[in-house]
Amino acid sequence: MLIDLQALRRVYHMGGSEVVALDELDLQIPAGEFVTIMGPSGSGKSTLMHLLGCLDRPTAGRYVLDGVEVQALQDLELSRLRNQKVGFVFQSFNLIAQLSVSENVQLPLVYAGVRPPERRRRAQELLDAVGLCQRQAHRPNELSGGERQRVAIARALANRPKLLLADEPTGNLDSKTGLGIMKLFEELHQDGTTLVLVTHDPGVAEWSDRVVRMLDGRVESDTSVRLREAGASSGEWREVG
Amino acid sequence: MMRIGVKNLFLHKLRTALTMLGVIFGVGAVIAMLSIGEGARRQAVEQIRLLGTNNIRIHHVELGGEAAAAADYRYSPGLTAGDEKMLRAKLPTLCALSAIRFLDVSVQRAGHEPAGVVVVGVNDEYDDLTNSRTRRGRFISWLDARYARRVCVLGAEIARDLFGVQDALDRRVRIGEEEFLVVGVMERKSVATGGVLEMRNINRDVYIPVAAALKRFTDPDFPDRVDEIAVQVSDAASVVPSSRVIDRILEKSHRGVHDYEIVIPDELLAQSQRTQRIFNIVMGSIAALSLLVGGIGIMNIMLASVTERTREIGIRRAIGASERDILGQFLNETLLIALAGGLIGIVLGAGMAFAIHLFASWETVVSPVAVLVSFGISASVGVIFGLYPARQAAQKDPIEALRYE
């Protein structure tokens, strides 16, 4: 298992009252799987994403990421883990406006302590892979939404993470551009990257192997999808098991 | 990391420049203060060296009005060559002693008369007293002094003015109406002008035996009068006690008339350094205040910058920056501002020091130590006032920061 969550709790304190965002959540994700997480807002999807991405620590319970007990780590080790094993893709791209495309992609490598020439070489490769090799020197605000998301994906992949987390990656894109991004994710999945994707869009969910539905901080349903193997292309999806 | 810092600073040129201002003025004041202090110190040391160390100077004081009448009444003739002889007899432990008589007479050779010459009557111990040496020939000898010989020793500049590149030794010059034989030429001495002790350019001195000065250029009213008696004692500790003894002896022989004044150059310098200290405190306070204001300015801007860049902090954290990385990034930027301000301040301070040198003709020296100290101060300001904003940045919750609009 790449991800193993056991009885995971996350409680927020807001002005005296407690908000239980995650309530004794159990979830296992094997390496190489493409999982979609769905659910209404307030169901704990974002909290789960932040915990999976090592941006946050659980109040109680156990989280093992690639053999590392995450709940016990201090900031420095947590940051290192985030840097090495996790890549984030956000709905609003979250590129740094002052830096060029190439510099944005290099940023995780900066924190990983990679030397500048190697950094530039890797950024070039990554941008080639997402089809943006001529855009390296541009600023993010000179790119279209789809291009920005490709840069963000290149950045997320910079340290060859085992886990790629995406929070509504197509939410700010038109459907055609979104399709391109999903194809990119599909390629990454084929290459063996574990993908966890949060979305409201059932059309996005149909690309994945497995759909986890959440409600009130718990897993409501957990279904495997066998869409592409079945050769269906209608957009309808069939649940198995 | 560094490049990102530099980039951010260039992005807000005006803001950065304004932020630096306090540090610039603070460091400028520090540099100006230190360079004035260092200049004054060097000048003092230089003057001490010229006057000779462990010196006591007894000046003749011209009395006026009632005091003059009282002096007449008590038959005090002012400072005389006799005082020198008496001090020598009563205080055999003194290292060196010389009566000094300044003459206002012309010096010429073959009709050429250089300006700004001071003819000084001294005895054979004067060169030891003032740490001076002859470059050619010899100084006034005991025999010259004893027999009031018409010999002279030329200061370096005067020798050049009168003889050019020729050798002045054993040639004659005309002093007043008399012919004097040149027996020596002094080494050139660097002369610090201005400062606490008014110094004449001793390279334009012409030395003759004091006895000759008194005999050939007699002041009919005061035939034995000298202007100064210079005394050298063996070590610094005995300067003040010796001066007291001398005072007592002279008071007695002058019958209580204070027509003389005892000056200790070392004391004068100590005094001037005390004055310097007050100046240093004032300048130091200005510098400290300016640096404090500058530091607060930097902190203020950095706090604003941290808030402005909350989202960026969130992104960096998500990508793998630790709290320490973020702290380092913002501390780096503050340090950069402070050091750049410090650098400009050093240039400004050096400029101020130069301007002071030009307009107030104080000697100023921008020493490497002062530059290092200033750099240290700017770095400290950067760290001290950068730490709080940088901590604020580092301690931001990454998730909150990512949501920040």
Image (cartoon, coloured by chain):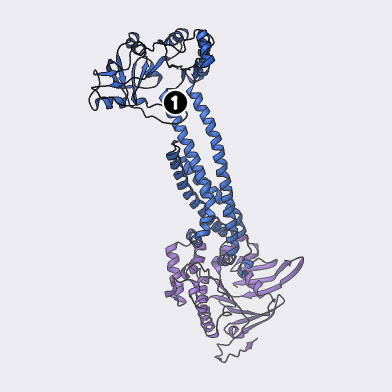
Chain colours: A purple, B blue
The chain containing the residue under callout 1 comes to B
What crowding class fits label 1: few (fewer than 14 Cα within 10 Å), some (14-19), or many (20 or more)? some
Residue B331 occupies quadrant: bottom right
Q: At which x and y percent is residue B70?
A: 53, 11
Quarter of the figure with residue A163: bottom right
Q: Mark 1 points at which residue?
A: B48
Is the residue B34 above or below the residue A161 in the image?
A: above
* B182 to B307, vertically: above or below: above
- Front residue of A229/B314: it is B314
Count of marks overlaid on the render: 1
In the image, farthest residue toward the right: A16
Q: Which of A154 and B339 is in front in this view?
A: B339
Using residue A175 as the reference point, say whether residue B112 is left or right of it: left
Q: Position of residue B380 (x, y in %)?
A: 55, 48
Q: What element carries label 1?
A: helix
Q: Which residue is at the front of the view, B128 or B369?
A: B128
Q: Which residue is drawn at 46% across and 31% down?
A: B195
Whether residue A55 is visible to the viewer of this picture, yes or no, is no
* Quarter occupied by residue A49: bottom right
Horizontal arrangement in the rendering, residue B43 relative to residue A149 (left or right): left
Percent from the top left, x then y, of residue B205?
34, 23
Quarter in which the C terminus of chain B is drawn: bottom right
Report whether residue B19 is seen.
yes
Residue type at mark 1: give it: Ile
In the image, A48 versus B355, the foreground residue is B355
Relative to A237, B157 lies left or right: left
In the rendered view, would you say B72 is above or below B102?
Answer: above
